[in-house]
Amino acid sequence: MNQFVTDHPDIARLITIGTLASGRKLLAVKISENPDVQENEPEFLYTSSIHGDETTGYILMLHLIDYLLSNYGVDDRVTDLVNSMEIYINPLSNPDGTYHGGNTSVNGAIRYNANNVDLNRNYPDPEDGQHPDGNAWQPETVAFMNFASQHHFVQSANFHGGSEVLNYPWDTWAKLAADNNWWIYVCREYADTVHLHAPSNYLNEYDNGITNGYAWYTISGGRQDYMNYFQHCREVTMEISDTKLLPASLLEAHWNYNYRSLLNFLNESLYGLHGIVTDSITGEPLSAKIYIANFDKDSSHVYTDPAVGDYHRLLKAGTYNVTYSASGYQPKTIQVQIADHQKSTLDVQLFDGSLIPSFTADKMTPNPGETVQFTDHSAGSPTSWHWEFEGGDPAVSTDKNPLVTYNEYGAFDVKLVITRQNASDSVLIENYINVAPAYLQGNYYFTTCHGNYFDTGGDNGNYSDNELTAITFVPGSADKKITIYFLGFDVEQSAGCENDRLTVYDGTSTVDPVLGYYCGNSIPESITATNASGALTVLFKSNASVTGPGWNGYVVCSPNVGIPENEEESLKIYPNPVIDGVATVVSTTTIRSLRVTDSRGKVILNEKPESCAVKLPGRLSSGLYFVSIQTGDHWYVKKLQVVK
């Protein structure tokens, strides 16, 4: 077992399940593409020789470990299994019984452990209680129960000898398992594949190699029923040799009979219904129950692995109504269609039901007289809404999605209060709506520090042919400079911009120095005056054919290249602009909520950091963003420029 891991350290790890009083260890090898990482993958367990004198599976499991490790990267099927699963193989689960006669030979092996207890009668039983055999749980039993509880095994098999048949649940009950049809299907597949590669008298007992456990003979305290009922696993008992202590000369033949079926059984863990269950707000994985109404019974439902949130529900082909539930969350039921030998993936988000006020506006920088559509996005199913619109008409609304007209220039707050029975919450976003004049390209001279700037076609139209106009923006204050932020730019592309061209001059006329000329889609995110007057002049020329959408810009006054805003000294974003790297929001008090939207109102980030420092995503593309920050009961909005 040590040598396997030494030879394949990239995909194998040696696991000690437990150490017995004899000093002998219960060992497993974990085989996975990333053996030290818990991933969204089914966990699978092969284990053998719980009866110490039934050793065929012991040798076959050693051979299987070697086969998987040696063929990884060579055989496509093996490589896919290792890359897609976390495979645990425990060749010997009763070493004291197998080596009862001494460590040098399996001659003298016995069924029982060192305390003369049948370990396959020593587990908690769904029908007959915690100690159905009247014995205390043995060290091997405790070790394997702990091992199973530390993992979320989707599927497993326990190898025995003395017969040749696959024994599926239940052993303790006459009633059939919820997944009885699935059990017959996968056991039939195993046996039928064996029959293609083995003598006609091998694995043909009972129903041609498979049987329901209780129909064969009932037992209590078996490992199979424990794993299925208490661990929500799918474990089968595989009796793979009539002779318990099979002669060495027959071992290789038994490997050849079975290894294809062993791979098939592994593959079954990749079929059925799989996915991740997460919190709809935070995206964090949840400890969730996956239950199928009018189907699941006797603990056949499964749970997610809370560390990752992944679940794996093995199912026979059919249509199922699957309910996802977690403590403190609203359940969700989804109908799914399952096909045999196919994987269906369904990721589910559950909501905790909290009231979380949230809204957007279809425009955040309207022109005077324009109407703004507000849309409620609040979570928690509110039943009433109370809006307050500073500077708006109406100033107050109880509509869910109100329309508001802004007639005056300025930056205005918006407040939303949402309620439902016995619950209420509110959000106030300061300076959310910025009403500014709209400047269209033309022969104009404007003194301004605030306004939207478009080509002659406005926000939604194209510019015209044969244009030749120059517009000048002057700050009107000696300590200010004009900055134009370009949020969109699309002018006919031509070599040297000979056809249509936008030229920016550093001053009050077209005889001042040129800061740049532009066409196509290429223009800086912002252009700032460097002259003493702080003015910029923009000349636009188009020829007699081909027009385009033009541009969408924003004119502001600034003491420097940074983005002007009403400073809240307790909040800072740095660096701003972001030229290369990641911006950080820093607050003197805890940031409860943080939302980033782009210039057109699309939400880029929405989280509840509960921290005084938050790094913004480094994946932001070039452009202007609005960062909404809640500290205490107040919201603040900062502008962020990203330059790539």
Image (cartoon, grey):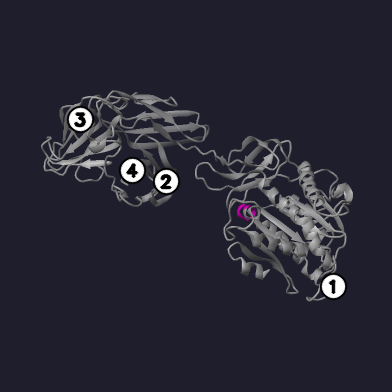
Amino acid under label 4? Ser
**Segment colored magenta:** 80-85
Q: Of the numbered discs in the image, which one, if any, rests on residue 592? A: 2
Residue 376: x and y, percent? 44, 31
Task: Note whether residue 146 is visible.
Answer: no
Q: Circle 4: is it few (<14), some (14-19), or many (20+) Cα within 10 Å?
A: some
Q: Is residue 282 magenta?
A: no
**What's the mark number on residue 622?**
4
**460 shown above or below 158:** above
> Which amino acid, by three-letter code, is at mark 2?
Arg
Q: Residue furthest front?
A: 495
Q: Which residue is mark 3?
A: 541
Distance between the Cα atoms at labels 2 and 3?
49 Å
Residue at the spot of label 1: 107
Question: Which quadrant holds the N terminus?
Answer: bottom right
Compared with residue 380, is residue 159 higher up or lower down, i.e. above or below?
below
Residue at figure coordinates x 22%, y 41% from the top left:
527
**In the image: residue 108, left or right of residue 500:** right
Which amino acid does the dot numbered 3 rest on? Lys
Measure the C-alpha gap from mark 4 to mark 2: 27 Å
Q: Nearer the viewer, residue 221 or 464?
A: 464
